[in-house]
Image: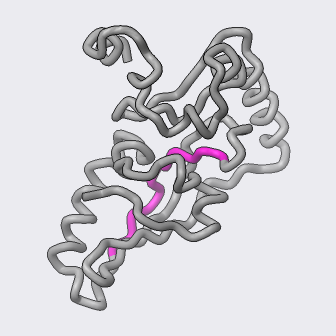
């Protein structure tokens, strides 16, 4: 079971709001495909050896999908170091962002994000499980949903097409 149950306020500000990912698998939806096996192996190791207080594996430079708390920023992968710990029968993650975004890069990133946010066509970002992780203003306005109503939901909830056809496309 790899769903997020709780997060502190810093996690919610820097990675994702819990209300958006409640019940979703963190590894499948927020870690890059190339890091998913490392995460799974580390979690299983902590489960097996978790009661050993000296065993706290750290996964370095894991690409983690970051979603803004206010839905204004485009989702992006940033690198984090994740420490895994065993406590109270659960695996806990503690992360530290290691990607450094320099001031001269911030303006270009904001311009890029604004372009996609205001694009004249509807755009969205789906998780590997088919949940909406981000949608631009055009998509939300066209469909008539707020970000709170739309983001975090399975795309099939809003799609009248046959699920097999839709999932094949994505």
Image height of 88 relative to 94, above or below: below
**Which quarter of the picture shows residue 96?**
bottom right
Give the residue drawn at x 47%, y 71%.
Answer: 94
State which quarter of the image contains the C terminus.
top left
Looking at the image, residue 35 sits to the left or right of residue 52; the answer is right
State which quarter of the image contains the N terminus.
bottom left
Give the residue drawn at x 51%, y 67%.
Answer: 7
Give the residue drawn at x 61%, y 17%.
Answer: 143
Residue bounds of the magenta highlight: 57-68
- Say if the magenta span includes residue 36: no
**Which quarter of the picture shows residue 140?**
top right
Residue found at the very far left of the displayed protein: 48
Q: Which percent across, then down, holds residue 79?
A: 53, 53
Image height of 144 relative to 150, above or below: above
**Of 46 and 166, the residue lying toward us:** 166
**Which quarter of the picture shows residue 131?**
top left
- Say if the magenta span includes residue 62: yes
Q: Which percent across, then down, holds residue 46?
A: 24, 73
């Amino acid at each position: 079971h790899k769903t997020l149950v709780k997060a502190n306020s810093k996690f919610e500000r820097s990675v994702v709001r819990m209300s958006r990912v409640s019940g979703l698998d963190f590894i499948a939806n927020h870690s890059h495909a190339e890091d998913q096996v490392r995460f799974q192996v580390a979690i299983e190791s902590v489960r097996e050896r978790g009661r050993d207080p000296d065993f706290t594996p750290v996964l370095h430079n894991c690409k983690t999908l970051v979603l803004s708390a206010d839905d204004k920023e485009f989702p992006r992968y940033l690198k984090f170091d994740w420490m895994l710990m065993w406590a109270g029968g659960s695996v806990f993650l503690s992360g530290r962002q290691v990607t450094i975004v320099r001031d001269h890069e911030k303006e270009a990133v904001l311009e890029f994000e604004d372009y996609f946010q205001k694009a004249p066509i509807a755009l969205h970002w789906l998780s590997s499980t088919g949940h909406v992780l981000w949608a631009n203003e055009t998509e939300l306005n066209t469909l008539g949903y707020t970000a709170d109503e739309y983001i975090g939901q399975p795309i099939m909830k809003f799609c009248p097409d046959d699920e097999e056809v839709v999932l094949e496309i994505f």
